[in-house]
């Protein structure tokens, strides 16, 4: 076949006589082909370099890691709390909460809407230090090692000493930080505006950054080797060491993301999708929109859906009210045990789905659910009105209930030998 005019030359006489231009044109075409090939190889090498060798490796400091349940955002704990434990202390709230308080063995850390983070003694509730936060913190601080980490609305990623509140480092990022970060492998991962950024947790140096589409809304979650983020329109997974995007799924109105037992979960206002951690996006993923356009025009076969384990629909609006503009509250963050994932709503509905295939195992209306349920060895623990409630995870039946305060409970945290609850007016630490 002639490479210039695509004529069949199988029966033609031998070409290439002296004075003809065919050999010269063939040689020029060959040189052009080599140039194109060299350009393709150079671009491919540049992309590989940027995604691997061109990115700093993570510090991999074993001492700088979030607690596993915090990093996975799966709300599980091996602690067996006592609901009727006496109150060790009660103190007035130092201000309106901007997120749920957290605690370690010695201190309770309280983020406030008045742009402060306050540390209280776990022993007696007295204030130990207070740090001003320009722009406010909209999520719970992350405890890792002997430091606290958070992101601010003024676009800063911050680390402070947990004992004194003294700043360890502060890094200015491109835009605001809304979602709670993850600290793992000696690095802090945070979404600033439309970028996912990896920072050295010891000094705040930027290790790499990647496109986060339209910015993460719920907290991030750490998988075995990656970071999962839910934006306003997509569910994304990134390689933790390189920042390369390994999975993408269109998902509107994201409410939560979590990792548990080898799978990642994306909760939206309408669906819950489970995806195996090893799942990777196909090589043609960037062409999905073009493929869809050709499919609509009848010029291509149907576009395959991104690979996933299962999906369940998750609407709370009764059919008769769907067209009346009645919006029900958003779901709480997901909770898990060894066999089930639990979806709960503030108005009281809770559902248990099997981890293996997403089948509905039980559904209950439990009254108010004022805090996201926490999975403990004794059962599902949550706040309802003025009481702490414990459910049997296999059936959804109530196992125990204990009234804690004269006001409705709003937040709940559990650590060894302590249960922390908050109301609109005070912090209460229960200790056996």
Image (cartoon, rainbow, N blue to C red):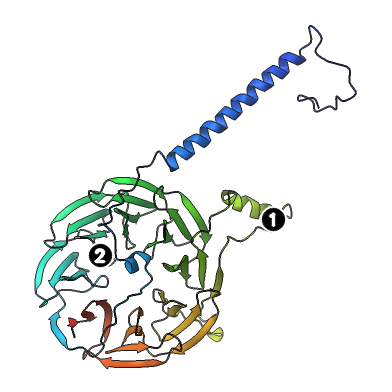
The N terminus is located in which quarter?
top right
Q: Nearer the viewer, residue 223 or 367?
A: 223
Mark 2 Cα-neighbour bin, 10 Å: few <14, some 14–19, many ≥20: many
**Residue sitting at x 44%, y 84%:** 350
The C terminus is located in which quarter?
bottom left
Where residue 376 appears, as percent x and y from the top left, is 34, 80
Q: Of the residues tagged 2 and 1, which is closer to the observer?
A: 2
- Looking at the image, residue 202 sits to the left or right of residue 335; the answer is left
The residue to which callout 2 is attached is 141
Can residue 270 be seen by looking at this rendering?
yes
Q: Secondary structure at mark 1?
A: helix
Q: Which numbered circle lies on residue 295?
A: 1
Q: Which quadrant would residue 15 be assigned to in this image?
A: top right
- Looking at the image, residue 24 sits to the left or right of residue 223; the answer is right
Relative height, residue 361 to residue 130 (above, below): below
Where residue 44 appears, as percent x and y from the top left, is 52, 36
Q: Which quadrant would residue 107 be assigned to in this image?
A: bottom left
Where residue 217 appears, as percent x and y from the top left, is 39, 63
Q: Nearer the viewer, residue 9 or 81?
A: 81
Relative height, residue 326 to residue 209 (above, below): below
The CA distance from mark 2 to mark 1 is 46 Å
**Residue sitting at x 50%, y 56%:** 247
- Looking at the image, residue 280 sits to the left or right of residue 329; the answer is right
Residue farthest top in this picture: 18
**Residue sitting at x 51%, y 65%:** 275
**Residue sitting at x 56%, y 49%:** 286
Relative height, residue 104 to residue 168 (above, below): below
Q: Nearer the viewer, residue 44 or 191?
A: 44
> In terms of sequence position, does the residue under pointer 2 or pointer 1 come before the other?
2
Relative height, residue 165 to residue 84 (above, below): above
Can residue 426 be seen by looking at this rendering?
no
């Amino acid at each position: 076949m002639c490479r210039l005019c695509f004529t069949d030359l199988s029966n033609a006489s031998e070409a290439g006589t002296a004075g003809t231009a065919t050999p010269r044109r063939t040689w020029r075409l060959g040189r052009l082909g080599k140039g194109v090939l060299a350009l393709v190889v150079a671009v491919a090498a540049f992309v590989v370099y940027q995604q691997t060798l061109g990115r700093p490796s993570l510090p991999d400091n074993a001492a700088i890691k979030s607690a596993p349940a915090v990093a996975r955002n799966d709300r599980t704990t091996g602690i067996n709390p006592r609901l009727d434990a006496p109150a060790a202390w009660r103190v007035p709230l130092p201000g309106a909460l901007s997120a749920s308080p957290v605690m370690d063995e010695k201190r309770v850390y309280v983020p406030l809407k008045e742009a402060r983070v306050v540390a209280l003694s776990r022993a007696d509730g007295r204030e130990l230090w207070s740090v001003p936060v320009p722009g406010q913190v909209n999520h719970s601080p992350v405890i890792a090692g002997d430091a606290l980490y958070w992101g601010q609305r003024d676009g800063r990623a911050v680390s402070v000493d947990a004992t004194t509140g003294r700043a360890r480092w502060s890094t200015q990022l491109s835009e605001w930080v809304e979602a709670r970060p993850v600290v793992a492998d000696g690095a802090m991962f945070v979404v600033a505006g439309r970028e996912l950024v990896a920072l050295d947790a010891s000094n705040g140096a930027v290790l790499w950054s990647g496109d986060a589409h339209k910015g993460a809304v719920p907290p991030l979650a750490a998988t075995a080797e990656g970071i999962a983020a839910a934006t306003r329109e997509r569910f994304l997974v990134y390689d933790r060491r390189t920042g390369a995007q390994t999975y993408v799924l269109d998902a509107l109105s994201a409410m939560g993301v979590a990792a548990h037992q080898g799978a990642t979960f994306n909760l939206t206002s309408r669906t819950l999708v489970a995806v195996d951690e090893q799942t990777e996006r196909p090589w043609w993923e960037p062409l999905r929109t073009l493929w869809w356009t050709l499919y609509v025009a009848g010029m291509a076969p149907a576009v395959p859906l991104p690979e996933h384990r299962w999906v369940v629909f998750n609407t709370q609006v009764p059919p008769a009210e769907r067209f009346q503009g009645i919006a029900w509250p958003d779901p709480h963050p997901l909770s898990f045990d060894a066999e089930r994932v639990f979806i709960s709503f503030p108005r009281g509905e809770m559902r248990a789905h099997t981890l293996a295939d997403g089948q509905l195992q039980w559904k209950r209306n439990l009254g108010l659910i004022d805090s996201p349920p926490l999975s403990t060895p004794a059962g599902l623990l949550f706040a309802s009105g003025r009481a702490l409630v414990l459910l049997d995870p296999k059936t959804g039946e109530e196992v125990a209930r204990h009234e804690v305060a004269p006001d409705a409970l709003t937040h709940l945290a559990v650590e060894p030998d302590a249960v922390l609850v908050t109301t609109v007016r005070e912090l209460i630490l229960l200790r056996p």
